[in-house]
Image (cartoon, grey):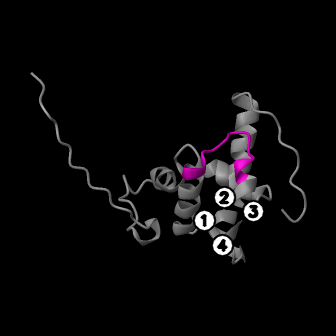
Amino acid sequence: MLRAVTCNLQVTLVDCRLMAPRTRRSRCPVACTLDVLGDRWSLLVVRDVMRGKRRFAEFIESPEAIPTNILSERLKRLMAQGVIRARKYSEHPPRLEYQLTAKGEDLRPIMRAMVEWGVRHAGGRTPPPIQPGA
């Protein structure tokens, strides 16, 4: 005997810029930092901005091959957290360039320490120097 199964599904589109900040796990500064940057992709996007990438297509060229839907979401999340800001460079079609905010710039020594640790302990290679103006 065959039975019909019905599934009711509701889909809600949400503009993440309007969402309330996520609830913190604790007031521990490490946990608070991980709440902002602790996913698989956010620090790689920040790294790319620090190394001079500005446009969506440039981020896609990174060797980690971040999926485009995840990249879009991470860029929005980093903007909502005040780590990066965007500026329109084209109206038709609308296109944005990204750059670090002062809050994002404060991540530079942390990123340097991560590079050093990754080279020393995790099999990473020393990256080429950052070009002036990047």
| First reached walking from the N terminus: tag 3 or tag 2 | 3
Rounded to the nearest angstrom, the CA distance separating label 2 from label 1 is: 9 Å
Q: Which residue is nearer to you in this view: 116 or 131?
A: 131
Q: Which residues are magenta?
A: 59-69
Q: Amino acid at mark 2?
A: Leu
Q: Residue at x 83, y 38 (%)?
A: 126
Is-magenta flag for residue 64? yes
Give the residue displayed 74% in from the left and 49% down from the top: 112
Name the residue beneath numbered marker 1. Answer: 83
Along the horizontal axis of the image, is 33 left or right of 94? left
Residue 117 placement (x, y as % from top left): 71, 37
Quarter of the figure with residue 114: top right
Inter-mark Cα distance, 4 to 1: 22 Å
Q: Amino acid at mark 3?
A: Arg
The residue carrying mark 3 is: 54
Q: Identify the amino acid type marked 1.
A: Val
Circle 2 residue = 107
Mark sitting earlier along the chain (4/3):
3
- SS for callout 4: loop
Q: Which of the marked residues, 1 or 3, is nearer the chain's N terminus?
A: 3
Q: Nearer the viewer, mark 4 or mark 3?
A: 4
